[in-house]
Image (cartoon, rainbow, N blue to C red):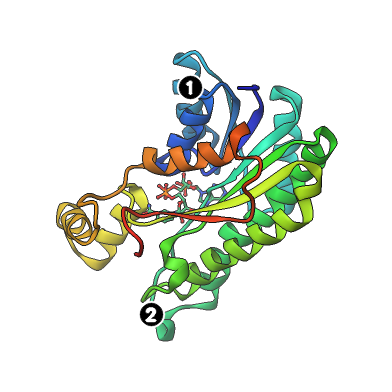
Amino acid sequence: MTARTAIVTGAARGIGAATARRLAADGHAVAVLDLVEEQARATADAITAAGGRAVAVAADVADEDAAAAAVERVAAELGPPQILVNNAGILRDNLLFKMTAADWDAVLGVHLRGAFLMSRAVQASMVESGWGRIVNLSSTSALGNRGQANYAAAKAGMQGLTKTLAIELGRFGITANAVAPGFIETEMTRATAERIGVPFEDFLAHAAAEAPVGRVGRPEDVAAAVAFFCSEDAGFISGQVLYVAGGPKA
Ligand code: NAP
């Protein structure tokens, strides 16, 4: 496989960290981007210790200048980025009548504005090299989920963004696809269990019982799907949404 430079956002932990490790294991140099450099460094150090190439980059993907500066730094330190995984995310769940405008803006800002800003910042180096892979993290919540008007709208938006990037960028050798996970065991789902007052083990057991495969997902399950879309072999697959949910629906 040709070694490329990859950027994974929100890669300090969870699905992003597993994806960064997986892309590094596949031979790519990886920029581990997250809000706090020290936390991103833990993932980058683990990759380096395993023989891979990685740097930690601190940036808020929702900040236009920070996103552009992060991409410039990656290009200078690892080479022009040709793979982008828009994974950074937050939750601000609440029923519609209690959801504040600030909670709406924060979630749309990180997921959707962040993916837009990062994609716009990397497209130039992808176009120039005639090869690129963009993978956006959507969710089964894109199909609608109680208490997640903001998150569901953002994750459905990621799918529309993905399909449009595929249409606009395809002629430059760039594909754009979305991976839509179901229930994955991470800090994000742990926080949801805490918020609704259910012990995490019970929350996991319930989700596992609901899934046709009889278990919850692991970050590595999602990383494998992302890695496939980033591979040379996936060059004729673009604008697709792959549900990684242990079954056909949420
Ligand atoms: P996670 O454990 O909460 O990790 C998300 C990471 O994103 C954190 O390290 C977080 O940093 C970082 N982040 C948040 N805001 C950021 C910003 N503005 N700029 C840069 N980084 C930022 O989440 P996860 O469960 O791994 O989820 C990863 C992605 O998969 C998200 O897009 C999520 O919506 C999606 N997803 C997850 C599940 C699931 O079941 N876990 C299901 C479907 C989709 P801080 O810790 O500093 O906030």
Instruction: Name the residue located 71 percent from the left edge and 55 percent from the top edge.
Output: 165
Q: Is the CB of the residue bearing disc 1 within 8 angstroms of ligand 1?
A: no
- Residue 188 disc label: none
- SS class of the residue under badge 2? loop
Crowding near pointer 1: few (<14 within 10 Å), some, many (20+)? many
Give the residue type that dot 1 points to: Ile
Identify which residue, 67 or 221, lies in the foreground: 221
**Quarter of the rendering containing residue 199:** bottom left
Q: Estimate the x, y position of residue 112 in percent, counting from the top left.
A: 61, 61
Whichever of labels 1 and 2 marks the residue nearer the N terminus, that label is: 1
Q: CA distance from mark 1 to mark 2?
A: 40 Å
Instruction: Name the residue located 55 percent from the left edge and 53 percent from the top edge.
Output: 178
- Residue 47 disc label: 1
**Quarter of the rendering containing residue 206:** bottom left
Position of residue 143 relative to residue 9, above or below, is below
Give the residue type that dot 2 points to: Leu
Q: Estimate the x, y position of residue 186 in percent, counting from the top left.
A: 34, 47
Position of residue 250 relative to residue 63, above or below, is below
In the picture of the structure, the residue carrying the numbered disc 2 is: 95
**Quarter of the rendering containing residue 207:** bottom left
Q: Is the CB of the residue bearing disc 2 within 8 angstroms of ligand 1?
A: no
Identify which residue, 245 or 207, lies in the foreground: 245
Is 100 positioned to the left or the right of 248 in the image? right
Q: How many marks?
A: 2
Is 76 positioned to the left or the right of 48 in the image? right
Q: Estimate the x, y position of residue 242 in percent, counting from the top left.
A: 48, 54
Q: Is residue 12 visible?
A: no
Position of residue 230 relative to residue 45, above or below, is below
Instruction: Name the residue located 44 percent from the left edge and 15 percent from the top edge.
Output: 50
Q: Estimate the x, y position of residue 187 in percent, counting from the top left.
A: 34, 48
